[in-house]
Image: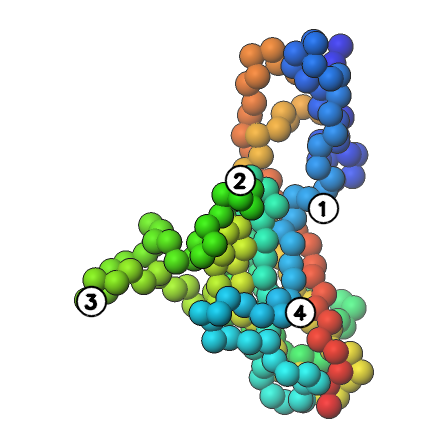
Amino acid sequence: MKLSRRCRTCHHILIKPESKAQATRFKIQLIATNYLPKITLPGCLSPKSSTVQPGFPLLAGEVVPVILRFANPLYSEMKVHVSADFDIRDDGCGDGAVAEVVAQEFVLPPFTEPWEYDEDDDMVASDDDHVDDSGNQTPAKQRGVIERRGNRVAIQVNVMPKAKTSNLVVPLHVVCTHQDDMDLDTDAPVQSDNTSTHRTVTNRFWVYISLGPVV
């Protein structure tokens, strides 16, 4: 009997057999981290963007905008919620700064193979675009969203260091939600009719942003 196998800790599928007998018996699925968005601090954005990363080192008492870029690794749309709620932590991490996530909720488009992207895909009109009085198409802007390109979204986080420190670390709580079509039963035999059940998967985790010294 062909069985699927899941991780006992995170419940993500690890091995899923092929439905056809002549095919390979098992195939390995993505590891758990491949279901989470990739988060980076981009050194630069598109030429059209006037927003740049702050200069370093940071100065105590001054608010600086920090740009975070989220990339969706999945082939399905992902909803993301980012918060800087340090009150739910008991380790004191984040006490050295005040952080404000300008765009707390946004949607990451599905991952698409690189060759399917246009060289300047953020110039293409989307459903949210509108036409101004001169007839030009202008994309509708969400407050705090600096850039949208492919499966990536760059958002702004305002950070104000409270005091001098050798390395400022800002924790952010991230909640990601996407639709998953994997079989719900861990050891259930694979159905021959290739039917699958969609379910909503929510992942929660902390991100620690190291911004260097504060003078």
Quadrant of the image containing the N terminus = top right
Judge from the rendering whether residue 143 lies leftward or rightward of residue 22; answer left or right.
left
Mark closer to the chain start, 1 or 4: 1
Q: Looking at numbered disc 3 in the image, what kind of residue is underneath it?
A: Ser
**Precedes in sequence: disc 2 or disc 4:** 2
Residue for badge 4: 86
Mark 2 highlights which residue?
A: 76
Q: Residue at x 78, y 68 (%)?
A: 91
Out of 164 and 149, give the one closest to the viewer. 149
Mark 2 or mark 3: whose residue is earlier in sequence: 2
Label 2 is placed on what type of residue? Answer: Ser
- x 65%, y 43%: residue: 35
Q: Earlier in the sequence, mark 4 or mark 3?
A: 4
Relative to 190, say whether 5 is above or below.
below
Q: Determine if residue 129 is in view.
A: yes
Q: Position of 212 compared to 112: left or right?
A: right
Of the numbered discs in the image, which one, if any, rests on residue 134? Answer: 3
| Among numbered discs 3 and 1, the one appearing first in the sequence | 1
**Tag of residue 33:** 1
